[in-house]
Amino acid sequence: MGEGAPLVLKLTLVTVMQGCAQAASSSLILLNKQILSGLDFHYPFFLSGLGVGVSALGSLAACRVLRVVPAPPRPSITPAFWVRSMVPVGFFHALTLCLGNTVYLYLAVSFIQMLKAFTPVLTLTTLSALSVETFSRRAGAAVCVITFGTFMAGAGALDGSRGSLVGVGVMLAAEMAEVMRLVLTQKLLHSQRFHPLEGLMYLAPASLLWISVFCLALEAPRMAAAGAFSTVAAHPFLFALAAGLGFAVNTLAYCVIVTSSSLSLKVFGTAKNAAVVYLGVLLFAERVTGVQLAGYAVSPGG
């Protein structure tokens, strides 16, 4: 084998993992939209907690019970270290999931995916600000192109209504939380040299802690009063599938971050976003304007 063979194998592996991650993510997006809007189950925090809960249990079982991943106890992971280094990551992950699901109550799937094209911009600037990665001139030019296309798509979709404006605000907050989560996760996974499942075993409980707090404070009383748990009992397969896909998305995302970077995860996601835009039109009869499509065509080009 030539000297470039290991690089080719690594690139192939990363590409395959990226494809699987984006396929699982796209499926989860459409399923969550169906549950939140189609079933009138307006409890995004509870829905977010399902995938994180299964992620915590599944990764623990893989590492400690089934021994699929050799992950002996680490003396360096003390309770103080977990609180100091992992609880903040869990906070931003919880915000990302909860706000990311909440936005489906306000905006169309297609428009949300267009706004997600702006995430690489936030990721790159944050990585550069924290000195995790270098901001090159070419990257700066790409950022400008992506930004221009995203604002075009946004201008073509906003109708000025309160719900639309609230939705955009929630979406931008979710994107910023996602960027902080990815950057902090990348630094943590690389510094500790975690296996992706081992990293998930430590980080998922931190996310679940915050989601539980959010859910108990904001949703649990309303769920009990409205009898929302009967919806879960009536559609167990959909909620179980959402939990399983959440586990898959979390695991594959950590695999990509460990083998490449958080920016790579977001850049590859632009292709997935484009597919979900068209699926949103086909499955939910969403309306997409010419200005939106023109703007969104620019962003993936960047």
Image: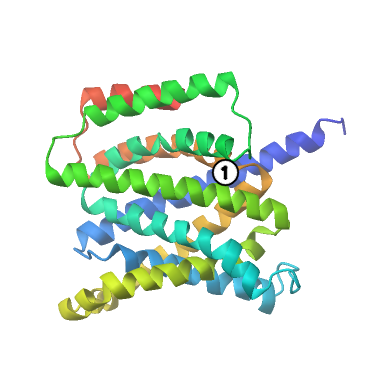
Picture coordinates of residue 287, whole percent (x, y)? 18, 35
Q: Is residue 221 above or below residue 273?
A: below
Quadrant of the rendered structure where residue 42 is?
bottom left
Quadrant of the rendered structure where residue 150 is?
top left
The amino acid type of the residue labelled 1 equals: Ser
Where is the N terminus found, in terms of image quarters? top right
Q: Nearer the viewer, residue 174 or 78?
A: 78
Side of 227 where 14 appears, left or right: right
- Residue drawn at (30%, 21%) of the image: 294
- The residue at which mark 1 appears reads as 262
Q: Nearer the viewer, residue 80 or 223?
A: 80
- Residue drawn at (45%, 49%) of the image: 178
Picture coordinates of residue 273, whole percent (x, y)? 40, 38
Picture coordinates of residue 115, whole percent (x, y)? 34, 37
Side of 83 where 238 appears, left or right: left
Quadrant of the rendered structure where residue 146 is?
top left
- Residue drawn at (50%, 55%) of the image: 249
